[in-house]
Structure formats: C-alpha cells, structure tokens
Image (tube, rainbow, N blue to C red):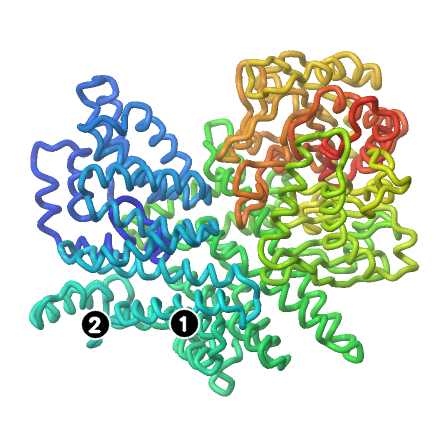
Amino acid sequence: MKNIYTLRLFSPYKICSVMTIRFSLLIFPVFFTLACCKGQSCCENAYTMFINTGSTMNLDSSCLAKEEREAAAIGQAALERRAKCLLMLSYDDLNSNRFENALQRLEVLKSFLSPSDAAHKQYTADLYNLLAYIYNQQSYQSLAEASYKEAITLYKELGMRDGQLINEANLVKLLAEQGKFSEAIDLGTRVCEETKSLFSFFRSGELKGTAANNLAFAYSLQSQSYRADMRTIEMRSSAEKALEIFKKNVDIASGIGGAPYRVTLLNASNAAALAEQYDVSRNFIQQYFDGPGKYPHVLNCANFSSSAVLHARTGSFDEALSDLINSCRPLGLATSDDPLATPEVNLPSGDTIQLFIAILQNKGAVLHLHYNKHHQIEYLEKSLAAYEQAAKILNNLQNEIFDEASVIAQRLRFHSVYPNAARIAALLHQETPTSELKKKDEYWRKAFKYAEQGQGFVLRQNVRAAFEAECNEYSTAEPHCREKALRDKLFQFRKLGAQDSILATLDEYYKFFHALKTSSNPADVQHYNQRFNHDVPSLEDVQQSLLPDHRAVFIEYVWSAPQPFALWITKKSKGVVLLDIPSGDKFWEDAKRYQEDWLKGEKDIGPSQRKISNGLYKVLLGNVLNDIPAVERRSLERIVISGDNGLRTIAFEALLMDEVPAKGNSHQYDLNYVLKEYIVSYQYSAALWRLQKEQLLSLEKSKRSRIGSFINIDQTGCGTLQIDNLGQFSLKKLPTLSSQVISFNSATTEVFEKNAPSFDLLHFCMHGCLNADPELSYLSFKGNAMRVLDLYSIRLNARLAVFASCSTAKQLEGEHESGIKGEGVIGLHRAVSYAGCPNVIATLNEVRDKPSALLLEYFYDNLLKDKMPTDEALAKAKRDYLKYGKESRHPLFWANFICVGPPAQFAR
C-alpha cells in the first residue's frame, strides 16, 4: 500500500490525501463505469476517471505513452488529448516515485500550454498543481510556492473553488515551513473560514481537516521560532492558538459517535446517512487497514502525541504527560510499569512507520521540555531513549525496500531524528558529573554516533539522484541500476497485488543486498557504503586513523534547535560545546550579511564587517578552541570541520580572530584571519572521511600520475564573469609545472567521459552554473553541459579534482543557501565525490578571474613542486596571496577556494 501518510498535506490536484483517493473508489463506483465508456481513448478514460473519482491507480502507461506520441505527431488539433496523456503519465511516474520523469513530462506540457489560453486553462491549472506537489516532495520550496500560487490563480479564474481552496490549504503549510508565519496564518484563517460552507462534495471533510491541521501547524511553528523560554508571551499565544485549533480538529478527526473514518460525520446530514457512511468507512478500513477500528485508533495516537507537544510548549505539563501516555501506550511505545519509558520495538509495518517515528520524536521533545521545567535528569534520559528508538527504526528502514514509506520522500520530516538524539546525549554529557566518568564518556560517544548518523542520512540522499538517473544499456550492471530495477519490479507487483511475486522479489532483493555487502567490486563497495552502511567511526578511529597528528582537531557541528552544539576531537581529548547562538534570526542575519559583504569585494573590511566576522568566530570557533586543553591548543595547526545547515557555506579560515587589526589599520593583510594560525579543511562527516581516506590509499597504489586539464572559456555559457586569465593559466602555465599535464581545450562532455577515468588529478576551467534544482546545476563544456545528475553515473579514479569554476560548493536553495533540509548542499563538488574522487578543491562563490589564476598558480606550485598535501598547499597559497597579491586582498579573492575531503599528496 502506497504511503498512506506521506501525501496527507501535500497532495496533487484536488485531492487532500491518498486515503481520499482510495475512499472515492468505494463511494463512486458509478463514475468508473462512466469514465470507461466505449469509444474513449485510454487518455480520455484515465483523465475522466481521475476528475470524477480522484483515482490514478492502474494506469496503462504503455497505452498512454503511445497515444501521447500520436497526439504530438498530429500537432495543434490534438493538444487537449496530449495534455491529458501527459498529465496521466506524470501521475503514473509519481506512483512509481519517478519524480524526474514526471518533471520532464510536465516541462513538455508547459511548453505548449499557456495560462492565458482559456480552452486549456483547466489543464494548465492541473499542471501547476502537480508541479507544486512534486517540488514539495523534492523540497524545492520556492518553486513549489510559485507553482501553488499559479494554480490558485488559475482555479480561481475557472471558478473551481474546491481546487483553489485545496491548493491554498497546502500552501499554508509550505509558507509556515519557510518561516512566512504571518502570510501562512492569514491564508490559513481565511481558508478555514471558507471551508465551513463546503458540504457539496465528498472531499470536503478532508479539506476541512487539512486546512485546520495546516493552520495549527503554522501557529505551532511560529511558536517554535521564538526563544525557547516558555514565558515568552508571543510563544505562548502562538502555541495556545495552535492547541485550540488542533483540539477542534481532534473532534473532527475522532468522529463523534464512534465513526471510524474522519469525514463520516461531516458528510452525514441525518442518522440514516451516518449509518450508511459508517458501513462504507468500516469496509474501507477492513480492506486497507487489516481490521475495523484500527485507523481511528492510530489517528487518535497521532492526535494525542501532537497535543502533548503543544501542552508542553504552553507549560501544561500534567496534560502533556497524560496525552503522551495516551499516544504511546496503545502502540507499545511505553512500558506497563513506567509509561514514560520507551521499550525496544521491532520495525513497524509500512503503514505505521512514519507515525511511530513522529510519535517517538514528539515523546522525546515533551520529555526534554519537562526536564527544562523541573531539571530532573531522569526526564532527559527518557527523552534520549525515545529519540534512540526513533533512530533505530529509521536505520532499519533505510535498509529496506519500502516504496510506500520511502525515507527519501520523508527526509524533511525525519532528518531531525539524529540531531535531536545527538543534542540530548550532549546535554546528558554536560549534566553528568565528572565523578561518573564512564557514564559521561558513554553519553559523549552517543552524541558523536548520532551526529555522524545524521550526517550519513544527509549524504545518503545522494543516492536518490542515482535512482532517478536513467539506467541505459551501458549502465544496467551498475549497482544502483540493479537496485532500481528491483524496486520498480516490486512496486509493479504491489500495484497488481501479486503476493507470490512480491515475496519472490523481496527474496531477490535481500540476496542482492547481502551480495553487495560482501562484494569486493569497487562500484559495489561504494554503493553499499553510501546507500546502506550505518557504521560510524569510534572516538579511537578518529584519533588513531583519521587525525594526521597531535596538531589537528576535528570539529563536527550539529545544528539542532533550540541548542546547536559542536563536538571536538584531538589525538588525546574530546569535548562538547553548546554554541551560544543569539536569540531569533540575528545569527543568520549576521551570517548572511557577512556573505553578502564578501560578494561586494570592497578594498577594505570596515568596522561593522570586522565586528560581524569576529562575532561569528567567537560563537562558532573561538569557544570550541578554548574548550581544548591549553597544552594541546598551543600546538594546533590544523582544523578539520564537518559543517551543518548554513555552516556548510561559511569559509571558517576567513573569520577574524580579533576585531581590531594587529597594526591598528584595516589593511587586509594586517587582519588576524583564522588562516594565519591554522590550516582549515572540510569533511562531509567522519564516516565518509574514513571511507574516502581508504579510497585515497587504494588510488595511490594504482600508480596513475597524469593530470587532465579540461578547459572551456566559451562565453556562450552561463557565466557572466570573464575567466580569460584562468584559461591562460590552465592552458599555458599549468603544463609548465608538471610534464604529466594533458590539456583538452574547448573540451566537450564526450571528451571528458572518455578520458577522465584515466587521470589521477582533474582540473576544470569552465563556467559552473547553478540551477534552482541543484541536481541540474552543471559545468559548461563546449557545446553541452555536464549536470550534477550526469556526474553521478561516471566512474572516476582521480585522487583530486580542482574546480576553477564558479560556485561548485554551493546551491540556490533557501534564504541562507544552506541546502535542502535532510540533504545538505548538493553541489558539483559532491557529485564528483560520489563519482569516486575523494579530495576536491571547490568554490563557494563566483571566481574572480585574475586573483583566482594567481592563487591557483601558488597552489599548484606548492602541490606539485613542493609536494605539500592539498590542504597545506591551499592554505599556503592563500597566505602567499595575502602577502604578494597585487589585486584586492579581500577574502572574496582568496577564501573562495576550499579543500573538501582527505588531503591528497603528489610526487614531484
């Protein structure tokens, strides 16, 4: 059964949930007959049934595709039929989780439909509604918002009030998730008011529930955005308003009179109608939920769980704990002797996995809030137990082949499980006295474990792109294509209800999984590690194997609201520091202003800029370094950083350790940058650091020594900045530094794909181009583009890739460009890492031509002539640029380049 809970609030077209789609098939069988009248095409049949019943199940994709091709050949006269075909083919793609395919079809549809075309306005409205849904699933919030608003406008012009209101209800939650609380609450209030008069169609109950839930959600998120002080008036009023709306919706959802399905009461005008709908609802539940009464039982658990959180936020802890017990006990998430304890549970069924994780997260949150109020450490311990159980379920889930409860589709909801578990463990480490050293050490290790698993969850989403990439005749042997084929086969059998075939495919999948786990094939090993491997390095692994020597520290940041923290490890010590982040959005406003000032590239850094930079240093780095024992701190030379959230796009080496310049003026060289004291490099996580270090050692044994330089400075690309000097350096200067350089001027993607696997070092000099969909960001080769998606399918053998290209460690997404929640920054640098290159020199912003060429000249000289490791070679190049560079020495011109991954080292 496909993802019952996933689409509740974000559903395509005019349906508020998958559940309603299924329900409609039981209530309106007559429409199915009408839809499939003799003489209609398969596109007409599918579209008519969809309009009348909301069903997109059992679509004949081959017939739809054939008819779409025929309609395309006919041209203008068959536009309407082609539009219906493309819409239904897109829904078929969604049923199989083929988001990229659906988007491609919708782009084709958009190309020949116009919003101003009255005859086709209905299809255009459907198009934008479907785009909004897909963008939401893909977490591209700005694109989803724009599409929702376009659909709302069109439905309004068409007079389709239900379509308008459903899109507006869905938009409420999206606006709230983006922090646009006033707009979300105003819109949600109006939608809730307007839905009161909607009793004319069977979906009205779903719409009322969705509208009320989303408005309550907006108030709840607004309350979270305030300080974590329960006495804050704004927070209390928002949380109380959310609780008030939620309680009203609990009454609707529960169904007064024991109705097992929540739309029953709303659609029943009299006792006879109530009895009739009760029977229909009961049959529905028996068919899809294995027994009457199970769904309302589960729904009430969810309601109690959410109510518990809202009670806790408003300070009503007795009510919160009561609701918590009522939400957990029926599902076996509480023990009989201690209702606040969390027992071990097995992996739930696909229909309830999301609910279990959500309730366990809420339980952890309520118990943590209770600890904040009463300061009894037992509540903090029980909070950790709840989060740990949620993490265990999530770990198991990622190894399964569930299509109906895909972790990928749920990353926005689930990505916070690990950071929350890490945060509670870190707090327990802080609260445990040094007299209980063993216990204190155990909590630190748990904090590190869950921080690492959280980063692994983020990085694992890379595999999503591999699943969605085309698997052609040349790539079918690749492990991601083999797994994709099994997933697709399983999904088709599940749609058909072929139980024997389902079991056989599952058996085939588990054999594939175990073969992958024991394989020595490099591609299989890489796929297993990035797709399934939940092992994280121990403290001893980091200290003995990863840190180069006693002069290095590894710092892992965990951005878990309301208390971000940092874990640090040296050769001899470890620690945790709770970050002193200012209340509200001031920190991110400062960080954003800091980055905007960067892009201006002014000659000098003024007092206000220095103050912000030094403030960021104190919060993010200074307090962490001060926590390290003085005897170790004095000898530190290297800082290795694993960032989180927006920290991934901050160049730590450009932060100022002092607000006032050493010599009393603001000349760039006199400023006390972190760079002057430390060599800074970046890692995705300690786990990936370990894997990439092993990969680096393996590649070193291959004895490759050639350097491939791929150049295209054609201004027909996306770039607006000149890169002539970089081009001249790449063509003329770089070959003089090593006899092993082979240059490909005006390089095409075909040349790159053919030659890149044979090189030990890859140099790119071309425009890097960002896209709102980060997986469509690309490198501008001659006559073609190499997208992030394309790079995933290439097998590279280079130890190092150097980008003399713009914004290769950046993406266009969100106010702080911090990346997609649950995914992090998806950039060209990560695609190259995924393709097999462990060490990357990437760029945070646009490259400035002349200064960048000089910096890279220093870098390659240090790397190839002086045989320095990449992190040291880059740091020295930056220091040399600050000393000798004739252009401005503003950080924009030197801190733009960062070293990501384990440093490689090359012979002369």
Amino acid of disc 2? Ala
CA distance for labels 1 and 2: 21 Å
Secondary structure type for disc 2? loop
> Residue 278: where, in percent of width, then height?
16, 69
Left or right side of 386 for 161: left
645 and 761: which is toward the camera: 645
What residue is disc 2 on? 259
The answer to whether one can see residue 836 in this image is yes
Residue 773 horizontal side relative to residue 26, left or right:
right
- Looking at the rendered structure, the secondary structure element under dot 1 is helix
Image spot of residue 466 (x, y percent): 51, 38
Kindly identify which residue carries mark 1.
307
State the residue at coordinates (51%, 85%): 338
Up/down of 269 relative to 145, above or below: below
Instruction: Locate the C terminus by quadrant.
Output: top right
Q: Amino acid at mark 1?
A: Ser
